[in-house]
Amino acid sequence: MSTIYTQLPDWPRAHGMPSSTAEIRTSNSDFQVTEQLGYELSGEGEHLYLLIEKNGANTNWVARQLAAYSGLRAADISYSGLKDRNAVTRQWFSIHSQRKNQIDWSGFSADGVNIVEQIRHSRKLRRGAHTGNHFRICLRKIGDDHSHIDQQLKTIAVLGVPNYFGEQRFGHGCSNLQSAAELFAGKRLAKPVRSLALSAARSFLFNDIVAARVLAGTWNQLLPGDCANLDGSGSIFKVTGVDDVLRRRCAEMDIHPSACMWGRGELLSDQQVAAVERSVVAQHQNLADGLVAKGVDMSRRAVRLALRDFSWEFVDEAVWLQFFLVRGSFATSVLREIADYIDGSQHANR
């Protein structure tokens, strides 16, 4: 019988349970995200890039509005990554539009959407092409005593945080995990729902493995049998022995321990690391077997998340945070280490 997932575990925090409370997203402007492509746009080519600022709109909905205005299919509108609806975000979209078929975007109008910049480039914008996102986030109602949060922030700046997938990966009420259980039990799902279900299943297993390393105190240490991840990249290399050079690189956040994203194939880790990964996955065998049966390949992801360009400013009973995270990581995984927060956003879909 498949496990029914209705609530996520409260995965352990690396820096202790926060003693402070806070509210996030009391307004969309309290959660600002700016996508960083990581490469220069040439100004020439068949692809028109649009830098879009959106407020209270999700990425897929914006793509449909761009398609409707241009007379193209939604599939002809490309973007690198999904961004929160309940936020003010800036991200790039690309459209295959030769100059002879140039679209006049001056008349484009959509609720909460503004075209900030237009520039051409030679290549289509592909999923996962951006290097990461810059965040500017406000934690409100933190009280007058800022000492505990200030200490947490200083610790996180040096040590980073566990690289958990955020709760949004699993859907409201764990709906994506429930879809995964249905998929693995034989139910046919529409392609977008199927994709979300598979991602949620892998992410759940990964988070449980990270949790085990947090509890063991090894989430920020390389162990024999580990596979190290080069910071900010997908590069992985096996660690046969941990020497002073590797310890220094790990302490400097140049490399991180990694954990498996479960699927078919052999584990790259071995020794103690592989034993932990197998033990955790065995507790959710239906998810593990389902991922293998659906042809998802084994991969790895960093256990630790480094914050770059990290700064903060206290203003009365609030603190404004600014930091950069590599793509695929979650700001909420940072926030949960700082305060026990309440999310004030309304998670309604367009």
Image: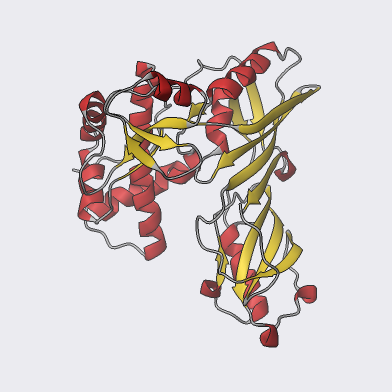
Residue 186 against residue 226 in the figure, above or below: below
Q: Nearer the viewer, residue 67 or 112?
A: 67
Q: Nearer the viewer, residue 350 or 43?
A: 43
The answer to which quarter of the image holds residue 25 is top right
| Residue at figure coordinates x 24%, y 23% from the top left | 272
9 with respect to 57 (left or right): left
Residue 300 against residue 124 in the figure, above or below: above
| Residue at figure coordinates x 70%, y 21% from the top left | 142
Residue 144 shows in the view = yes
Point out the image quarter for the C terminus.
bottom right
Residue 205 shows in the view = no
Q: Position of residue 29 (x, y in %)?
A: 74, 43
Q: Position of residue 9 (x, y in %)?
A: 39, 29
Q: Position of residue 197 (x, y in %)?
A: 36, 52
224 with respect to 40 (left or right): left
Count up the numbered dots.
0
Point out the image quarter for the N terminus.
top left
| Residue at figure coordinates x 56%, y 53% from the top left | 130
Residue 101 against residue 252 in the figure, above or below: below
| Residue at figure coordinates x 64%, y 47% from the top left | 86
Residue 331 against residue 67 in the figure, above or below: above
256 with respect to 209 (left or right): right
Q: Nearer the viewer, residue 333 or 92?
A: 92
Q: Position of residue 277 (x, y in %)?
A: 26, 31
Q: Residue furthest bottom?
A: 100
